[in-house]
Amino acid sequence: MARIVGGIGSSHAPSIGAAWDKGPQREDRWAPVFDGYLPAKHWVEAQQPDLLVIFYNDHMNRFFFDAYPTIALGVGEVHKQADEGWGKRALPDLRGDPDFAWHLARSLVEQEFDPTICQEMAVDHGILSVLPLFGDAAMTLPVVPIAINVIQHPLPTARRLFRLGAAVRRAIESYPQDKRVLVMGTGGLSHQLHGERYGFVNPDWDNRFMDLLEQEPETLAALPHQDWMERGGTEGVEMIIWLAMRAALGAQVRRVHRNYVAPMTTGLGLLALESLSHAVGEVR
Ligand code: FE
């Protein structure tokens, strides 16, 4: 049987990838960000996952406004890097796991979630800005990407994503082969990229969010989008993606590592959680 070995919540941003690619020439202001990933990287390596399930959002690099899926699941053998307009980075394509992904698709539909099932799923900085920070080994693991619409309204509610995470847990635990699955959720944290509040960052909310995600995720699941946007900026609403990861871990978690830096236009958070819940369906 497959089981979840832990969860990672992480911000994503194109700037993380651009700074990371500078290698030893990186600017000093990025050191607190990248150094903050090292304990999480070592923990992930120690968990020896076989597979990554990653909740993230696409930024109009795979999906466009002519047809934008609320929830999309990648079932292909390979997930190529989307070209975001400034050329591709020197990264390998990600491997998929079609057998597991199709199991996930069937299970989610049976549980009355209906993802758009994608044979091709080019992935953007929603995954690739942060996955390299977990090491070369993480970049070679099979990935099942689950893209969430946090761009084109109407958006799924935070509670919908919370329930999606619980459904993904049930799907993972009903997979007959032994697999150690690490679940990730990426997005945010607080940021706003247009209008009068351009550059808005709210470290108090970002840290409160990480407290609540760990201890009282139901409280976050009850928040309407308006609250997320007022507290964390319009684009900060993508923080709701972390709720899917959190719900997949079950009711009880233990914090392994946490980091927060607000260097520029986005609050950058990282949270590594161990699941202490071993029964299926503890989160509703
Ligand atoms: Fe984003």
Image (spheres, rainbow, N blue to C red):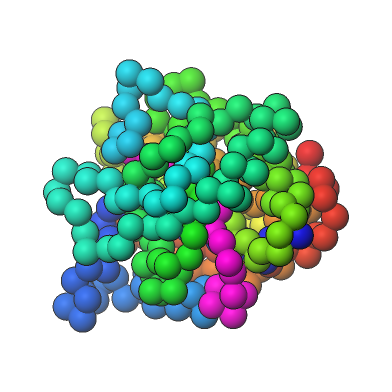
In this image, 74 relative to 282: left or right? left
Question: Quick one: quadrant of the N terminus?
Answer: bottom right
| Residue 58 visible within the image | yes
| Residue 237 visible within the image | no
**Looking at the image, which residue is at 36% across and 47% down?**
123
Toward the viewer: 133 or 207? 133
Residue furthest out toward the right: 279
| Percent position of residue 98, x then y | 53, 48
Q: Residue 57: within the magenta?
A: yes
Q: As displayed, is residue 8 above or below residue 220?
A: below
Toward the viewer: 279 or 202? 279
**Looking at the image, which residue is at 58% across and 49% down?**
99
Toward the viewer: 238 or 123? 123
The part of the image, by quadrant, that contains residue 114 is top right
In this image, 121 relative to 228: left or right? left
Q: As displayed, is residue 131 above or below residue 197?
A: below
**Looking at the image, which residue is at 33% across and 36% down?**
62
Question: Quick one: quadrant of the C terminus?
Answer: top right
| Percent position of residue 181, x then y | 63, 61
Q: As displayed, is residue 119 above or below residue 80?
A: above
Q: Residue 266: within the magenta?
A: no
**Looking at the image, which residue is at 48% across and 20% down?**
154
Q: As displayed, is residue 229 above or below residue 132?
A: above
What is the span of residues highlighted in magenta in the rendered image?
A: 43-59
